[in-house]
């Protein structure tokens, strides 16, 4: 694999009302030598302005369309700009930019088109027991419906080749996009690999995370999609 400085790598960050932390997230990404592209998904605060001031390319949705739509906007932007590798990265500070290098290296080492971060192969910091149970249930359900045997199915830290990214077309705009993403990987027939990463939970990120009601909404979204496939 060529040195990362010679590669065109874009870090796609979907953000909604993340002005409080987005500057620190972007600083972490830029410190590792990567270009962050932030999709301000109709934020009501200063997310877009803060992201631009921190040195990110900022794309804006005039209204909130959901994380799936924001990621799709970022992926399409990256493909239009001759990107070699695309990494999706959460805006709430849970991910560590130091893990990006491992994802990119795994793509080359395994000849894969998708490298999927796994907190359960790596580490979690301050993960509440209730959230662990919710994540494990989501993993079981997604493995059952997609046929992919993964340890962590709702981790937003992923890397993909240009070929892999071209096979992703997210239509689920709420959090169900994470399961839809894996379903499209399964149907693409392209290879994938899981990579250990660290996810750190804070009061801020937990407040913005999924609830049981969100999980039930995801089940409805995915069931509806399958009925209309």
Image: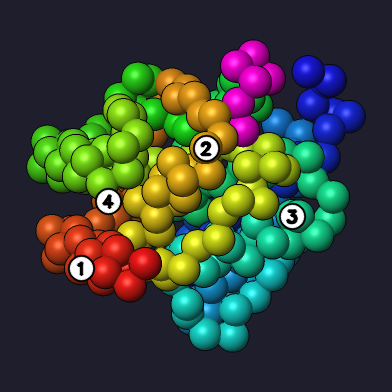
Disc with the residue nearer the chain's start (3 vs 1):
3
Residue position marked by numbered label 4 in the rendering: 206
Q: Nearer the observer, disc 4 or disc 2?
A: 2
Q: Nearer the observer, disc 2 or disc 3?
A: 2
Q: State yes or no: residue 101 in magenta.
A: no
Q: Residues within 10 Å of mark 2 (few under 14, many from 20)?
A: few
Q: In this orientation, which residue lies closer to the viewer: 31 or 209?
A: 209
Disc with the residue nearer the chain's start (1 vs 4):
4
Query: What label does residue 78 carry, if any?
Result: 3
Q: In the structure shown, which secondary structural element does the residue marked by tag 2 occupy?
A: loop
Residue position marked by numbered label 2 in the rendering: 189
Q: Are marks 3 and 4 in contact (CB under 8 Å)?
A: no
Establish if 134 lies above or below 129: below
Q: Alpha-carbon distance for marks 3 and 1?
A: 30 Å
On the image, the x and y values in percent for residue 143 come to 27, 38
Q: Alpha-carbon distance for marks 1 and 2?
A: 26 Å
Q: Are marks 3 and 1 in contact (CB under 8 Å)?
A: no
190 sits to left or right of 81: left
């Amino acid at each position: 694999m060529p040195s990362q400085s010679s590669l065109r790598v874009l870090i796609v960050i979907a953000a909604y009302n993340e002005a409080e932390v987005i500057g620190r997230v972007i600083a972490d990404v830029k410190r590792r030598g990567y270009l962050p592209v932030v999709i301000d998904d109709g934020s009501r605060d200063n997310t877009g302005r803060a992201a631009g001031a921190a040195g990110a390319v900022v794309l804006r949705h005039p209204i909130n369309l959901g994380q799936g739509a924001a990621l799709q906007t970022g992926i399409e932007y990256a493909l239009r700009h001759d990107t070699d590798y695309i990494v999706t990265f959460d805006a709430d500070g849970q991910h560590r930019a130091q893990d990006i290098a491992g994802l990119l290296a795994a793509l080359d080492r395994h000849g894969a088109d998708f490298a999927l971060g796994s907190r359960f192969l790596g580490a979690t910091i301050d993960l509440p027991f209730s959230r662990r149970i919710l994540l494990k249930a989501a993993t079981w359900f997604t493995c059952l419906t997609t046929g992919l045997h993964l340890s962590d199915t709702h981790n937003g830290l992923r890397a993909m080749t240009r070929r892999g990214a071209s096979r992703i077309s997210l239509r689920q705009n709420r959090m169900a996009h994470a399961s839809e993403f894996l379903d499209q990987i399964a149907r693409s027939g392209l290879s994938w690999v899981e990579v250990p990463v660290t996810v750190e939970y804070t009061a801020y990120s937990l407040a913005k995370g999924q609830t049981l009601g969100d999980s039930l909404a995801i089940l409805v979204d995915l069931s509806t999609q399958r009925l209309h496939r």
